Every structure is written in structure tokens, then in C-alpha cells.
Amino acid sequence: MEFAELIKTPRVDNVVLHRPFYPAVEGTLCLTGHHLILSSRQDNTEELWLLHSNIDAIDKRFVGSVGTIIIKCKDFRIIQLDIPGMEECLNIASSIEVMNLSSILFLAHNPSC
């Protein structure tokens, strides 16, 4: 099975990225089989590429119809994504969780990688 088959919602627009000490960035969030990518819609100069294997934990919160995913990375970064639409937020969060677990299980099953 390919990791891309586990993605329920591959792309979401109008996602806001919050990071400590950086201004908020609005853009398009894309999930691939190995990366979470957020690209700014304004200049296309601001991009975030995050390997699924670098994700340590995620937390989901909801306020009205906006969902927030807080990602804690293995390199101690904390990233907050504000995603419009509860269904899209749940799909993104569950896809990240499943792909993160699948990549861990794949590496445990194939130690030669």
C-alpha cells in the first residue's frame, strides 16, 4: 500500500500557519505520501516542508467551524495550523496520524532502510 492512499483530503486552501517568533502565514496545505507542505498564496516565497517522520505528536482543537492542529515535531518545533472546516481538519489530522504511524511501522519492519 502506498502512503498516498491513506490521505483523505490532499489539499486545503486558506490554512493559517502560526510559528513562534514568525508572522502568521496564510496559504494552501498539501499532504503527500511523505511530506506536509504549506505554501503561501501571496508571494509563493514562504513554504513549509515537513516530513511525516519528523512529527512527534498532534493535538486537535475546534472553535466553531475552524479547526486547529498543533504539531509537535521531533526537533522541538511547534507548528499550529488553523484549518477552515471541521471535516477538512479531522481528515488532515487523521491522515497525518495514520501516515506517521505507518512510516514508523514500515521502518520497524524493514530495518535495512
Image (cartoon, grey):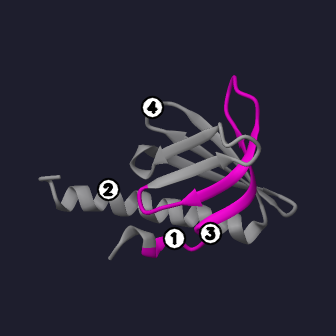
Three-letter residue code for mark 1: Ile
Location of residue 24 by image quarter:
top right
The residue that mark 3 highlights is 91
Picture layout, residue 56 above or below residue 19 = below
Identity of the residue drawn at 68% across and 55% down: 28
Q: CA distance from mark 1 to mark 4?
A: 24 Å
Three-letter residue code for mark 2: Ile
User: Tag 1 or tag 2, which sits nearer the N-term?
Assistant: 1
Nearer to me, 42 or 22: 42
Picture coordinates of residue 74, whole percent (x, y):
43, 37
Numbered tag placed on residue 24 in the rendering: none
Q: Is residue 19 magenta?
A: yes
User: Judging from the image, what secondary structure is the residue with disc 1 in?
Assistant: loop
Picture layout, residue 101 above or below residue 75 = below
Q: Classify residue 32 as left or right of residue 23.
A: left
Q: CA distance from mark 4 to mark 3?
A: 25 Å
Nearer to me, 76 or 83: 83
**What stretch of residues is rendered in magenta?**
5-34
Numbered tag placed on residue 75 in the rendering: 4
Q: Residue furthest top?
A: 21
Nearer to me, 58 or 7: 7
User: Tag 2 or tag 3, which sits nearer the N-term?
Assistant: 3
The residue that mark 1 highlights is 7
Picture coordinates of residue 106, whole percent (x, y):
26, 62
The residue that mark 2 highlights is 104
User: Tag 3 or tag 4, which sits nearer the N-term?
Assistant: 4
User: Judging from the image, what secondary structure is the residue with disc 4 in?
Assistant: loop
Nearer to me, 108 or 21: 21
